[in-house]
Amino acid sequence: MTQLSEKRKALRGRISPERITPPEELARRKAEKTKLRLRGQAIFERIRPELIDEYYNWFIAIEPDSEEYLLDPTLLGIVQKIKEQYGDKNVMLATFRLNETGTCGRI
């Protein structure tokens, strides 16, 4: 099994070596996502009590810098609203569900 895994790794690198992302870059991206999630979660915890009764189980996408948020009852709806609001801009939003836990699905 180890040999097969090593073979697959070798094939991936050989097919497209320029597309291999260095571990440092992966770590930087992960840290950035964690920072975004924590900032968004702080805003979410602050506004959740105001919204949870009227919009229970709706999706909420929060832009941490401006603290603006979008609401929709469906995942596809929230994605569409994000596209309409931000267009082609490279924007990072934290997405939650307006319920007791804030999670969007099961793990």
Image (spheres, rainbow, N blue to C red):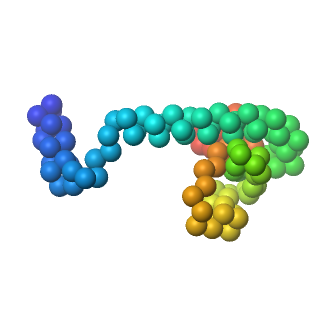
In this rendered view, identify the residue nearer to me: 99 or 87: 87
Q: Position of residue 20 (x, y in %)?
A: 28, 47
Q: Position of residue 97 (x, y in %)?
A: 70, 44
Residue in the picture at 64% in, 45% down: 94
Residue in the picture at 21% in, 55% down: 16
- Residue 76 appears in view: no
Q: Position of residue 47 (x, y in %)?
A: 83, 40
Seen in the picture, residue 88 relative to 104 is either above or below; the reply is below
In this rendered view, identify the residue nearer to me: 77 or 42: 42
Quarter of the figure with the N terminus: top left
The residue sitting at the top extreme is 2
Residue 70 image-quadrant placement: bottom right
**Left or right of 51: which side holds 100?**
left
- Residue 53 appears in view: yes
**Left or right of 24: which side holds 45?**
right
Q: Position of residue 106 (x, y in %)?
A: 57, 39
**Left or right of 12: which side holds 68?**
right
Seen in the picture, residue 55 relative to 80 is either above or below; the reply is above
Q: Give the total number of marks visible in the rendering.
A: 0
Residue in the picture at 87% in, 49% down: 54
Residue in the picture at 68% in, 36% down: 39
Seen in the picture, residue 2 relative to 96 is either above or below; the reply is above
